[in-house]
Image (tube, rainbow, N blue to C red):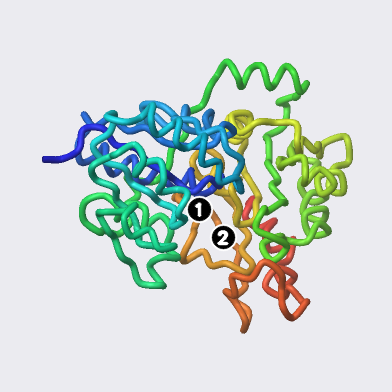
Amino acid sequence: MSAKNILIVPQNWLGDIVMAQTLLKKIKNKNKSINIDVLVEPVFEELINRMPEANKAIVLNCKHSELGLGKRFRLAKQLSGTYDQSIVLSRSIKSALIPYLAKIPIRTGERGESRYILINDLKSFSREDRRKTAYRYVSMYSEKEELDEKYFPTLEADSENTNNLISNLGLKLDKKIVIFAPGAAFGPSKMWPVNKFKELGSKLENNFLILILGSKNEAHIGEQIANGRSIISLCGKTSIKDAIDLMHISEFCVSNDSGLMHLASATKTKSISIYGATSPDLTPPLTNNKEIHYVKASCSPCFEKICKYGHYNCLVEIQADDVFKSFK
């Protein structure tokens, strides 16, 4: 008998949660009547609200690095008896605790971190397949299968929030909008140099309004690129739902391999994606409306946060002129 109520426990990173929508789509494709909830940190509740396949977000008020045993026990007690199955996408021990403590009968996931009693429906993947994040996610439910475009993420737009943004930010829509997303929480080996973004901005600013998105920790990057006129930094000034709606009304999004890249791929904008230490073969933007810039250096993909050689050739060798051609 198949489960009727499923709790998804994703990795609590922006890009991973967007890619996890592929799993929600697969489940609904198999059986539209299944109820799906998603366990996330508070900051991602509004992201789950934009996924039509999700019933609701279950919010765990824990910081990313926090074990929070007491909070997990209390939430598990509240959820006890609610779900037939949980699918745990992270391999950490703490991610598997709530499904176990809530006594969810079927607890699907990978072994990882000695979770021998926490997970009772084991899925296994080769090292290569583990790095194909979206493939691994859709293969967690039912049979393993290649990622079909019908499972690509699609986040809903909110017209009321969009209109409020346009008004509150004082945006003039006489030019088409381009989003720049120059940050990457992973580290500098994913970040196209700031001077390259500046050079690209100078080529585009006469014909486009450029909005720079990112976290408050990336505000200094946005300030280096912005000119206060047609290139405006909104780093640290927008929420996830704001970023979704701004992307829906933009023509292009230029980003590193980051959470905002995956967010853009789930909207109407064209995703222009720049890869460094990672590979577009493994974590591509899940959309057909995309263009990828990737220089496969002799040492790439290395998956290192910091270039151990110090040259970052995989990023430096991608020229602003080459990225500019994506706009033609």
Which residue position is annotated with label 2? Answer: 292
Pick the residue in front: 281 or 238: 238
Which residue position is annotated with label 1? Answer: 285
Nearer the observer, disc 2 or disc 1? 1
Three-letter amino acid code at disc 2? Ile
Give the x, y percent position of residue 76: 40, 34
User: Would you identify the image quadrant in which residue 173 lies?
Assistant: top right
On residue 60, the disc is none
Q: Earlier in the sequence, mark 2 or mark 1?
A: 1
Residues marked 2 and 1 touching at CB (< 8 Å): yes
Three-letter amino acid code at disc 1? Pro
Residue at x 53%, y 22% (from the top left corner): 158
Give the x, y percent position of residue 12: 53, 45
Pick the residue in front: 292 or 113: 113
Is residue 248 visible from the viewing direction of this image? no
Tag 2 secondary structure: strand
Q: Is residue 5 left or right of residue 217?
A: left
Mark 1, other Cα within 10 Å: few <14 / some 14–19 / many ≥20 = many
Image: 188 above or below 234: below
Is residue 265 visible from the viewing direction of this image? yes
Image: 222 above or below 57: below
Give the x, y percent position of residue 134: 40, 55
Mark 2, other Cα within 10 Å: few <14 / some 14–19 / many ≥20 = some
Quadrant that contains the N terminus: top left
Give the x, y percent position of residue 326: 62, 55
Tag 1 secondary structure: loop
Residue at x 35%, y 72% (from the top left corner): 126
Tell me the distance, in whole angstroms, between the alpha carbons under discs 2 and 1.
9 Å
